[in-house]
Image (cartoon, rainbow, N blue to C red):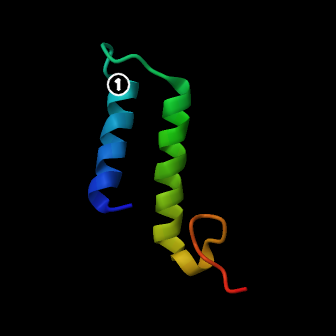
Amino acid sequence: MTERELDQKIAELDRMLNDPETRMDPHKVWALLAEISRQSVTSAIGPAHAPGLGATRAA
């Protein structure tokens, strides 16, 4: 995920949580949080050390 895509997801989440005119869909909120946190974990520890988070393993 690019930094721009991450920023868009964070903005969408912020809107869902803080804009009273936006309907909050709990499933979408959790899905966005999962994507954001997965990206944050992968970025923080590196893809080679994040098995199951989009990283590939050597067979």
Residue under circle 1?
Answer: 18
Image quadrant in which the N terminus is located: bottom left
Seen in the image, is 2 located left or right of residue 42? left
Farthest front residue?
A: 59
Against 34, is 43 above or below?
Answer: below
Q: Amino acid at mark 1?
A: Asn
Rendered residue at 58%/73% (across/down): 55
- Taking depth in this image into account, of 8 and 19 the one nearest to the observer is 8
Rendered residue at 30%/60% (across/down): 3
Kindly state the secondary structure of the residue where label 1 is placed: helix
Rendered residue at 30%/13% (across/down): 21
Against 55, is 53 above or below?
Answer: above
Farthest top residue?
A: 21
Farthest bottom residue?
A: 58
Seen in the image, is 5 located left or right of residue 32? left
Against 31, is 6 above or below?
Answer: below
- Crowding near the residue tagged with mark 1, few <14, some 14–19, many ≥20 C-alpha atoms within 10 Å: few
The part of the image, by quadrant, that contains residue 18 is: top left
Farthest left residue?
A: 4
Give x and y (percent) for residue 22: 34, 18
Rendered residue at 30%/50% (across/down): 7
Give x and y (percent) for residue 56: 60, 76
Give x and y (percent) for residue 20: 33, 14
